[in-house]
Each structure stands twice: as structure tokens, then as C-alpha cells.
Image (tube, rainbow, N blue to C red):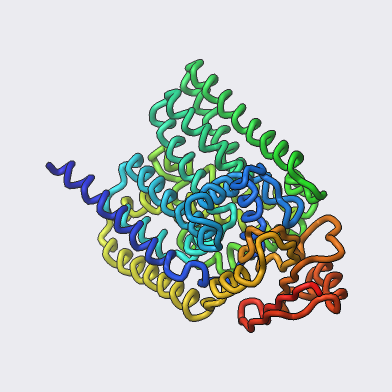
């Protein structure tokens, strides 16, 4: 009876966490934040996937296809819910729901207490980090979801060295990698840990298991490279160019600042001590997972220092593992008298985070303009029109043939319609060049926004 009550409680809390998470994320989803460039970038590939064109990117010409898991998921969602910014972001929200489910299963695998699970779920749904990751149509939403699934099977494999667990780990490793190759670093480190354990276990099956995991990782790299080379219609940076130590002198200070003095610090002030604590625990699986993410955190700026704009994203993968490790830390603290005080402080911290989310979303960033622009632009621009657009307005005209201000090849000389915004007009060469021909167009629509400045639509004479 007690066991049944225990699992009923666990089920209650994960259901409640999902409900609160959806309440946080779904209302006003399209208008909550301005469109990010990468949302449009991956949405274009998703659109072509939904049309049976594979992983083509016609709006930029390249990119948004090597990491092809998110385009597959978003393209599938387009079939179900239609072509809209809401659908793009709904995909990210559902990735967050599945991440919560995988996290819940990991906590069951570690036999965490209900109190510990409530703490983990509370941190997840209140954190500004996950509120952002699982709101935007960027690849991290899918890669973190699959990384969490991979960690579940990694924990199971460490307990029971079966083919089923290794196949599960290999499958999630593949999908996490095609979600974003940064996850391969974590699974490579985990593979090294499993290699050491295999030597201790003295079983030949473990070597065969590791061989499958290695082949999966290699296959994921080949698949990403083949997809990018086959579908790119313009030359862009290779995904392998991010694997470089050439910029480490500039990257390392920026990387440390990301952890110690930025918005990331808001959650790392809790997670870093938890991760370091985990490295010294008697429970071997907790210790090994904590060790893997510490090594990941140390190696990341050395291996991925080329692209400074992407450097901070490594913290996302550190955070999700740190969030999992909150549970064994809470169970450890429950042994001490000061547990009530720690619980009160942690609860206040989560409530303040949740309040910060609401303030930032509704008080700072919210503007009802994306849905209005989407409605208006679809009404005035025919489906067969050729359009030049700011990339941040692309999700509003998903089904048109579009070239964006990020297009990497030569753009056509004329278009049926131009969609420009004042904030981005001078930032990109394509917009500057197209605007030089503005005398050939008539202004037919304008809307003032705080998210993009004035949005202007021109029709060719």
C-alpha cells in the first residue's frame, strides 16, 4: 500500500509540473517574445521538410539543416497544426514536456524521494532558463530533450548492463547529436567512463555495447555532414569549423563571464555547487554523471571556441544535468536539522524566479504584434508571390517563396513584395542593397512595433 501511495504521489507531481509548465508557456505564445533569427532559419528547413523537399533551406541558402532533428519535428507539427509561428514554438514547448517526463523517469531510476522530485520539478518550471529554451524554435529544445532521454538510459545501463539499455542510449545519442552536435561531447565523455567501467567488469558484452555506441556517434556525424552538403545551395560555415581551439584566448574569459557574471549566474549559483557536490558522492552513478558534466564544462570552451555567439550555449547542457543532480543533493540534506531552513530558502528562490519570468515575459517583452503581422501579411501577400523579407518576419510568410536579409547567395534583382523593418534595415548587406531599389516599389503597409521598429511592406510597381 505504501509503495502504491509513493508512486501515486510521484505521478501527481509530474502531472502538476507539466500543467504548470504549460500554463507558463502556452498563453500568448506567439506574441510573448520577438522572433529570433534562428527560429526563422530552422522554420524554413522545417517548411521544406513538410513539403517533401528534404532539408532544403531556401531562405538563407545553407544552415538549419545539419542539425535536422528540430526541422523534422517542426515539419511534422506543421502537418498537424498548420503553418504559423505558434506551431514553431509549440514544438519547443512539447520538447519541454518530454524533457520533464525523462527527468521524472531519471529520478525514479535514482530512487529519489518525492521531496527531492518536487524540488527538481519546481526548479525546472520556475527557471528562466527552461522558460526560454522551451519557448523558442531553436535546436537546443530538441537536443536537450534527447540528451535527457540518453541520460535515462545511461543511468539504467550503469545499473544493468543490458543490450536494451545500450540500444536506448545509442538511439538517444544519435537524436541528441542531430539535434545539436554539442551533446556528442557529453556522450563521448560518458563513453570514456563506460570504457573504464567495462575494464572493471571483465565482460566481453560490455565491449560490444561500447562498439555500438561509438558507431552510433560516428554515424550521427556522417549523417549531419551528408545532409548539409546535399541540401546547401549556398556556401556557409561548415559545422566542423566550430570544433577549434584557435580562438581560446578570447573565448575563455567570455566563457567564464557567462557562468560568473551574466543572466546564467542566476541559476548556476545553485547548480554549480550541486554538480561539484555530486563528484564526491558514494552513489556511483551520481558521481559519474557529475564527473561527466564537469569535464564537459572544462573542455567546452577549448573545443568550441571559434563561434563566440554560440559559446554561452554550453551552459544549457551543464544546467540540465545539474538540475537532475538537485535530487540526490536534496535527499542528502534531508538528514540534517537545517533542512527546513534550506527548503524555505529554495522555495523562495524558485518563487522569485517564477515571478521574474512573468515580469520579463508580460511586463518587458510582451507585445501583441507577431499575430497581427502574421494575419495582415498573409492577407495582403498572395501565396505565389516572391518575397524579400527580414529574417525575423519570415515566420509570418512561411508559405511564400522567400529570400531573407541573411541569404548567402546572390539575391534576385526584383521581388513581388519587400518586407523590411527599421531595426534590421541597416544591419545586413542584402537589406541595404535591396533598399537601394526602393523607388521601384510602392509602400502598401506599415506598422509601428517596439519589437522590430516600424515594419514596412512594399509592392513592386
In the rendered image, the vertical position of residue 307 relative to residue 185, given as above or below: below
> Residue 207 vs residue 325: left or right?
right
Instruction: Name the residue located 68 percent from the left edge and 39 percent from the top edge.
Output: 224
Judge by depth and name the residue closer to the eye, 377 or 434: 377
| Quadrant in the picture for residue 395 | bottom right
Instruction: Name the residue located 48 percent from the left edge and 51 percent from the top edge.
Output: 80
Q: Quadrant of the N terminus?
A: top left
Residue 126 spot, x, y in % from top left: 41, 65
Residue 185 spot, x, y in % from top left: 61, 42
In the rendered image, the vertical position of residue 69 relative to residue 261, given as above or below: above
Give the farthest residue toward the top: 204
Q: Is residue 299 visible?
A: yes
Q: Is residue 322 visible?
A: no
Judge by depth and name the residue closer to the eye, 32 or 43: 43
Q: Quadrant of the C terminus?
A: bottom right
> Residue 265 vs residue 281: left or right?
right
Judge by depth and name the residue closer to the eye, 430 or 81: 81
Residue 137 spot, x, y in % from top left: 57, 58
Instruction: Name the residue located 79 percent from the left edge and 66 percent from the top edge.
Output: 415
Residue 221 spot, x, y in % from top left: 67, 36
Give the farthest residue toward the left: 1
Give the farthest residue toward the bottom: 448
Amino acid at each position: 500500500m505504501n509503495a502504491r501511495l509513493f508512486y501515486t504521489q510521484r505521478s501527481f507531481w509530474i502531472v502538476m509540473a507539466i500543467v504548470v509548465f504549460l500554463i507558463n508557456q502556452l498563453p500568448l505564445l506567439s506574441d510573448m517574445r520577438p522572433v529570433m533569427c534562428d527560429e526563422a532559419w530552422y522554420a524554413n528547413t522545417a517548411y521544406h521538410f513538410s513539403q517533401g523537399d528534404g532539408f532544403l533551406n531556401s531562405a538563407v541558402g545553407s544552415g538549419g539543416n545539419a542539425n535536422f532533428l528540430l526541422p523534422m519535428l517542426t515539419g511534422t507539427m506543421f502537418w498537424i497544426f498548420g503553418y504559423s509561428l505558434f506551431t514553431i514554438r509549440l514544438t519547443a514547448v512539447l520538447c519541454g514536456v518530454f524533457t520533464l517526463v525523462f527527468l521524472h523517469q531519471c529520478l525514479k531510476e535514482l530512487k529519489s524521494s518525492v521531496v527531492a522530485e518536487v524540488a527538481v520539478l519546481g526548479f525546472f518550471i520556475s527557471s528562466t532558463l527552461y522558460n526560454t529554451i522551451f519557448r523558442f524554435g531553436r535546436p537546443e529544445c530538441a537536443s536537450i530533450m534527447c540528451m535527457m532521454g540518453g541520460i535515462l538510459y545511461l543511468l539504467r545501463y550503469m545499473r544493468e548492463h543490458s543490450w536494451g539499455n545500450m540500444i536506448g542510449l545509442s538511439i538517444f545519442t544519435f537524436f541528441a547529436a542531430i539535434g545539436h552536435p554539442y551533446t556528442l561531447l557529453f556522450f563521448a565523455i560518458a563513453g570514456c567512463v563506460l570504457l573504464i567501467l567495462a575494464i572493471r567488469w571483465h565482460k566481453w558484452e560490455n565491449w560490444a555495447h561500447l562498439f555500438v555506441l561509438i558507431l552510433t556517434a560516428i554515424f550521427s556525424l556522417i549523417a549531419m555532414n551528408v545532409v548539409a552538403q546535399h541540401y546547401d545551395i549556398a556556401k556557409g560555415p561548415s559545422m566542423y569549423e566550430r570544433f577549434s581551439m584557435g580562438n581560446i584566448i578570447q573565448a575563455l574569459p567570455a566563457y567564464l563571464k557567462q557562468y560568473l557574471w551574466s543572466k546564467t549566474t542566476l541559476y548556476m549559483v545553485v547548480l554549480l555547487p550541486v554538480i561539484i557536490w555530486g563528484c564526491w558522492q558514494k552513489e556511483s552513478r551520481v558521481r559519474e554523471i557529475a564527473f561527466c558534466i564537469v569535464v564537459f564544462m572544462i573542455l567546452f570552451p577549448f573545443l568550441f571556441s571559434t563561434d563566440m555567439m554560440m559559446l554561452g550555449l554550453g551552459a544549457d547542457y551543464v544546467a540540465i544535468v545539474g538540475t537532475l543532480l538537485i535530487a540526490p543533493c536534496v535527499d542528502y540534506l534531508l538528514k540534517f536539522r537545517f533542512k527546513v531552513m534550506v527548503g524555505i530558502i529554495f522555495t523562495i528562490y524558485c518563487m522569485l524566479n517564477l515571478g521574474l519570468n512573468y515580469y520579463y515575459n508580460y511586463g518587458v517583452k510582451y507585445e501583441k504584434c507577431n499575430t497581427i503581422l502574421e494575419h495582415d501579411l498573409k492577407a495582403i501577400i498572395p501565396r505565389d508571390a516572391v518575397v524579400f523579407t527580414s529574417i525575423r518576419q519570415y515566420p509570418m510568410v512561411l508559405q511564400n517563396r522567400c529570400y531573407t536579409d541573411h541569404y548567402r547567395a546572390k539575391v534576385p534583382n526584383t521581388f513581388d513584395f519587400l518586407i523590411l523593418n527599421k531595426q534590421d534595415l541597416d544591419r545586413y548587406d542584402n537589406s541595404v542593397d535591396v533598399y537601394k531599389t526602393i523607388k521601384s516599389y510602392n509602400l502598401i503597409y506599415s506598422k509601428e512595433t517596439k519589437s522590430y521598429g516600424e515594419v514596412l511592406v512594399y509592392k513592386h510597381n
